[in-house]
Amino acid sequence: MEREELADWLRLLLTPEVGRSSARKLLAAFGLPQQVFAQPMSALRELLSAAQAQALRAGPPDLAQQLQNTWLWLNAAPSAQQRRILTLADSAYPTGLLETADPPLLLFLAGQFENTWPPAIAIVGSRNPTPQGLANAKQFAAQFVGAGYAVASGLALGVDGAAHEGALEAAGAGPIATIAVVGTGLDRVYPAQHRTLTHRIATQGLLVSEYPLGTPPLAINFPRRNRIIAALAQGTLVVEAALKSGSLITARLAAEQGREVFAIPGSIHSAQSRGCHALLREGAKLVETAQDVLEELVPWAGPAPASAPPAARAVAEPARREDALTQALGFDPVGLDALVARTGMAPSDLQARLLQMELSGAVARLPGGLFQRIALA
């Protein structure tokens, strides 16, 4: 992209009085931004209010600084990644997003991008998941990557971060293991705890934002970015979600866009399962294994689904079921006294066994002296 072309697109994007909808109307009527700005006021007034037309003609006051910052950012990409800006007129703009009701004017990209968007599955969920939810997000993500899909999510704490991590850990030769759609400018890292994860995604995946550089983490931006996550994926899997979770927004946007929606059921006693149960009542597909998702997306798929994880489950689960303590744990959080009553074990022996299981990743220790079994996805 030439600097002059970038200036025109940024001018259209950054004029706050105009907005995305009006900007798209102008592009549809007149062509590229350069042609939009060449129109007389009378032509602009057919589509805009007088205030909007005046603001567009004047341009945003910080355009020169934003242009300089963006141009420097584009041309200062580290050797391990690329930086690029896609416009609505770019042939590489994702088709699925272009077909939505509100496609962004610009997409800022950082990472591995070669003009082709990989088939992807979105994994979203709670920012405060249970240990089982975190394990499910990582395990499902790894299996999706093994089946030839990238994993799309929102880089939030909790399920999103676990999904990105699981995808990166399973990454092979393919350049894009995961796609992180963020709610800030790509010169910001949010949340700060994901700084290292963000750098890993930039070298093995792709960071995507519709927001110009310098955009801080405003609360209103995160629900908006969910439509991009849904549009970039062939299906959306909700791992855990409360009834008012933003993950449900992503799932419903996916359904509106004609994508598949999947949900993992959970305990009836867990608040983090109620959003998934609501989706299931609305028609989402109940998911117990990664294969449940993959078999619905066969027409989109590239490589055949990997068979190793199901085989591993077939060996691991019977072994766990044979263990009396594993049976006593069940799948809901449980306290030490209840486990003593269920197993008949001495408290000291039980605590030692629980510690062994915790260190092996089979059990998670929760606040309040509770323990929860971690099952393979």
Image: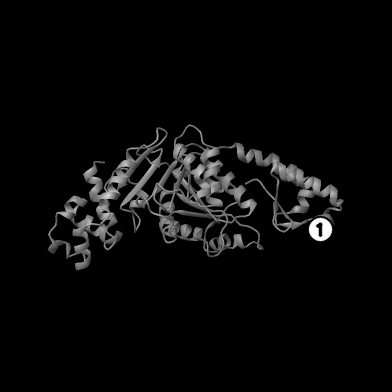
How many labels were placed on the picture? Answer: 1
Task: Identify the residue at image location x=67%, y=63%.
Answer: 269
Q: Quadrant of the N terminus?
A: top left
Determine whether 256 is above or below 326 in the image: below
Q: Nearer the viewer, residue 35 or 79?
A: 79
In the rendering, at what x and y percent does residue 169 appear?
A: 55, 38
Asked if one can make out residue 305 in the rendered structure from this viewpoint, the answer is no
| Type of the residue with mark 1 | Asp
10 relative position to 155: left or right: left
Q: Nearer the viewer, residue 319 or 53?
A: 53
In the rendering, at what x and y percent does residue 123 appear?
A: 51, 50
119 relative position to 313: left or right: left
Task: Identify the residue at image location x=55%, y=51%.
Answer: 159
Q: Nearer the viewer, residue 321 or 206?
A: 206
In the rendering, at what x and y percent does residue 260 appear?
A: 47, 53
Q: Quarter of the image holding residue 45?
A: bottom left
| Label 1 neighbour load within 10 Å: few <14, some 14-19, many 20+ | few
Which residue is denoted by mark 1 in the rendering? 337
Determine whether 22 is above or below 107 in the image: below
Asked if one can make out residue 285 in the rendered structure from this viewpoint, the answer is yes
In the rendering, at what x and y percent does residue 242 appear?
A: 57, 62
Q: How is the image coloured?
A: one colour
Q: Quarter of the image holding residue 130?
A: bottom right
Task: Identify the residue at image location x=54%, y=52%.
Answer: 157
Q: Secondary structure under badge 1?
A: helix
Determine whether 112 is above or below 297 in the image: above
293 relative position to 186: left or right: right
